[in-house]
Amino acid sequence: GQNIDQPTEMTATEGAIVQINCTYQTSGFNGLFWYQQHAGEAPTFLSYNVLDGLEEKGRFSSFLSRSKGYSYLLLKELQMKDSASYLCAVTLTSGGGYNKLIFGAGTRLAVHP
Amino acid sequence: DGGITQSPKYLFRKEGQNVTLSCEQNLNHDAMYWYRQDPGQGLRLIYYSQIVNDFQKGDIAEGYSVSREKKESFPLTVTSAQKNPTAFYLCASSLTTGTHQPQHFGDGTRLSIL
């Protein structure tokens, strides 16, 4: 089966750095996405990793190790607006040329003053 | 502004009733998707469409139906056969179903049972 694990909840302080981990065990792997979702709103795309290493985008960075089935999202200089759920999703090749996206349950991050 | 519009934002269903959730996109994307989000679980795929006039079942298609008569529209019908329909429903689209293409999501419809 396909399995993606993330911590359920995390808390952090405004201005600090937080790392959200994601481990996956899937049959096949074509890439990994991170999305941000504020409560009751649409998930929004943050990053995509397909090769091992770190991808940096402003305050957000995402790391991937394919051999370990592991990724993390690093958020720097935390702001109150970063309080949200962060979804890890793995893309796999399915039948008919369709690339299926499997989502983890998400990590709810609370940023405190 | 380009984007995905879902309506209504809140919907209530009576026993034995079919309800239809609307999803419209003006991003000129070929692929569209419907997901269901339940507390403590990841998004689960209900149906997807790679191109107009074609759609395929996802992991939890039972009790749901879709159509894709126009590129920009992908409505989802929750039928009376779906015994546990209370959930947050998300529509998404992507340029294609290529591995690197991020999916863009609408703001969701929250469906509850009366």
Image (cartoon, coloured by chain):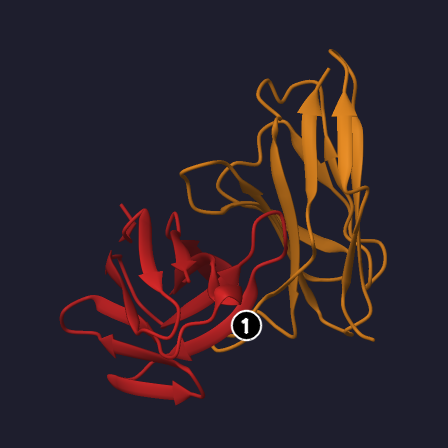
Whether B103 is drawn above or below B18: the answer is below
Q: Return the residue found at the far top.
A: B15
Q: Identify the subunit bearing mark 1.
A: B
Q: Which residue occupies 72% across, 71% down?
A: B29
B74 or A61, nearer to the observer: A61
Whether B30 is drawn above or below B24: the answer is below
Q: Is residue A98 visible?
A: no
Chain shown in orange? B
Residue B41 as seen in the image, left or right of residue A4: right
Q: Return the residue found at the far left.
A: A68
| Residue with the mark numbered 1 | B102
Q: Which residue occupies 81% across, 41% down?
A: B8
Q: Which residue occupies 50% across, 36% down?
A: B38
In the rendered image, the quadrant that contains the C terminus of chain B is: top right
Mark 1 neighbour class, 10 Å CA radius: few under 14, some 14 to 19, many 20 or more = many
Give how far across and how far down residue B7 sits, in percent: 81, 46
Chain shown in red? A
B108 or B48, nearer to the observer: B108
Residue B10 as seen in the image, left or right of residue B81: right
Q: Return the residue found at the far front.
A: A113
Give how far across and how far down residue A22 sits, in percent: 27, 61
Q: Quadrant of residue B71?
A: bottom right
Look at the numbered disc 1 and give the secondary structure of its residue.
loop
Give how far across and how far down residue A43 sits, in percent: 57, 60
Q: Amino acid at mark 1?
A: Pro
